[in-house]
Image (cartoon, helix red, strand yellow):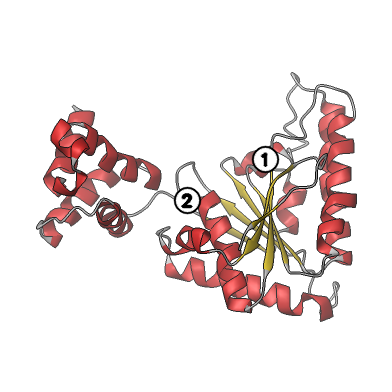
Amino acid sequence: MPHVTVPPGVEGIAALVELPDPAWESRWTRIVAPAALKERLVNFAVFALRHRARIDSVGLPLHGLVVLAGPPGTGKTTLAGGLADRAARELGETVLAVDIDPHAFPSQLLGESQRGVARLFGRTLPDLAARGKPTIVILDEVESLAVSRAGASLETNPVDVHRATDAVLAGMDAVAKAWPNVLFIATTNHEVGVDPAFLSRADLVEQMGLPAAEAVAQILADTLRELSAKDGASATDLASLARSCVDAHMDARQVRKLVLRAVVSRRELAADPTKLRLADVAAALKADRS
């Protein structure tokens, strides 16, 4: 599916994409996360988009909001996009994915953040939802948007922070009530920086931590396959290197970049990465830790 052109002058929208899209499929299939977590995410997306319209908001208060929380480099943003694509495939229909620019709203001008947020939730998102397609809104780095009012810095304008966060909460409530075809997927590296009232509205809050050894082994193998590197290393060697990565407290992104570091460590590998071997990756990790 092609990208949908963002109308000129629309504030806060980084991209509009019609899903499913082959270019987005790997965002789901190649992010290594617990199978149970992925199952909950896709089941909730299907449930919410198919059934929320008929569910009483008092009997089961659904906001259509998922929050993925955890440290940087754990795949939250990529998985959010992958979930949108997987939901479209499961639903068997076109889904409009709306990628929000988290840095489009903070402003030094008193009240401007609040007005920008109010326009997003009060006009822009309803206009998109009115097209009738299931609409998935990705709120990356949501701590930039729904700032914790209790932790508002004295370096900012606390009144403006309060008003902007109030606008996010009011906007979420309004969209949830009027547009059951909208699902929000939010990510945060800093959960304590997100306002508790926003988190309380979440239907699911899923934690994505640093990968365990088994997951690291899968990530290493997947990255080697991406480079078409044919390695004869044993499963024992792969598991050993994975444990070393865990001991180094590496996140998923760092594990993949470790493979890149091994490639660029020698000219022959940079010229032909298919010659890369697991031993080269292990050597790169050892060099970094020495």
SS assignment at label 2: loop
Location of residue 64 (image quadrant)? bottom right
Residue under label 1 = 143
Circle 1 or circle 2, nearest the eye = 2
Residue for badge 2: 75
Q: Is residue 188 or residue 109 the one in the foreground?
A: 109
Q: Residue at x 53, y 60 (%)?
A: 82
In the image, taking residue 265 as reference, residue 173 lies left or right, namely: right
Q: Is residue 217 above or below residue 93?
A: above
Q: Residue 11: where, in percent of width, then height?
A: 80, 40
Q: Position of residue 237 (x, y in %)?
A: 12, 54
Q: Earlier in the sequence, mark 1 or mark 2?
A: 2
Q: Secondary structure at mark 1?
A: helix
> In the figure, residue 31 lies in which quadrant?
bottom left
Task: Answer above or below: position of 263 versus 207.
Answer: above
- Against 170, is 64 above or below? below
Split into 4 quadrants, where in the image is the N terminus? bottom right
Of residues 65 and 150, the one nearer the viewer is: 65
Q: CA distance from mark 1 to mark 2?
A: 17 Å
Give the amino acid at mark 1: Glu
Residue located 87% across and 65% down the image: 177
Measuring 83% from the left and 81% from the top, which residue is drawn there? 54
For the C terminus, which image quadrant? Answer: top left
